[in-house]
Amino acid sequence: MLITIKVGGDILVNQFPKELAEEIKNLSSEHKFVLIHGGGDIVTDISTKMGHPPKFVMSPRGFKSRYTDKETAEIYTMVMAGKINKEIVSVFQKNGINAIGLCGLDAGLVKAIRKEQIIILNDQGKKILIDGGYTGQIDKINDAFLSLLINNDYIPIICAVAMGSNAEPLNVDGDRMAAKISSALKSDILILLTDVEGILIEGKILEKISSFEVKDLLEKIGPGMSTKVYAAQEAVNEGVKEVIITSGFRESAIISAINHKVGTVIKK
């Protein structure tokens, strides 16, 4: 079984959890893995220390994102593809896992169309049009290259940096990247590991939902979870069998998700 895992930035604040790496190692005799990681909080911290604090914008659909000008793009790429990515690879290698760290520029792994302009909500809640900066919409995945690595027993560790048409690094959402990669590879399962147990509705964890019910759900949840739910819907509609949103902090997080003992399951 091919399993794609997205690890959220909250899980990476100190270091990639050794327990998760050990669990992946134990499961790798039965399953193949691809891992996509975020790290926005770490980028924010380093960017602020460098005198370039981040600016966040809200889309009319309720999605919060980092506004990425040229300097932000450079810092973002440095931290995501350099510091965070290689620290994760190091943890995997220490645990005897043959991991390889990548970003979207490597072998044209993830290509994106740079957004010339974007619509955001201003402080008064009105729609305004601004320059798109260095953000992108994912257009193509080099699944042949990824399959080559996976079939030769490497575990790709991929950060959320894509390649634009001029080979420039672009900021893309990690959950959306995970959806696109898992779809391109026709993964059996996409697991979105975050800092909560699943989708919370009226104080209770939603155990299961179909991709067709997602639209009604988006109005009831916050911006952070909205992005994950939208990505889950996208992945399922494009061929992934199921997506599970669950906490990466719990014990045996991956096997518990696979067996539907935790989290929220999204299926078609």
Image (cartoon, helix red, strand yellow):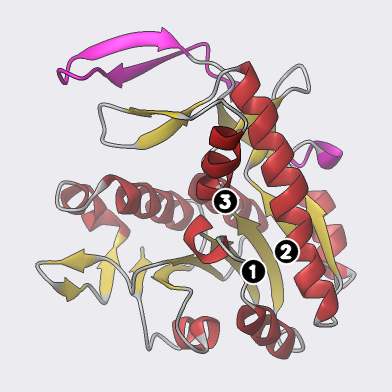
- Residue 119 placement (x, y as % from top left): 34, 17
Callout 3: helix, strand or loop? Answer: loop
- Residue 156 appears in the picture as rendered: no
- Residue 39 placement (x, y as % from top left): 57, 51
At a point 21% along the width and 67% down the height, the residue shown is 200
Residue ID for mark 1:
16
Residue ID for mark 3:
39
Is 184 situated left or right of 81 in this image?
left
Query: Mark 1 Cα within 10 Å, few/some/many (few <14, many 20+)?
Result: many
Residue ID for mark 2:
88
Q: Amino acid at mark 2?
A: Ile
Callout 2: helix, strand or loop? Answer: helix
- Residue 22 placement (x, y as % from top left): 69, 85
- Residue 176 appears in the picture as rendered: yes
Is 262 situated left or right of 117 in this image?
left
From mark 3 to mark 2, how far is it between C-alphas? 11 Å
At a point 16% along the width and 75% down the height, the residue shown is 204
Q: Is residue 120 magenta?
A: yes
Q: Amino acid at mark 3?
A: Gly
User: In the figure, 178 relative to 240: above or below?
Assistant: above
First reached walking from the N terminus: tag 3 or tag 2: 3
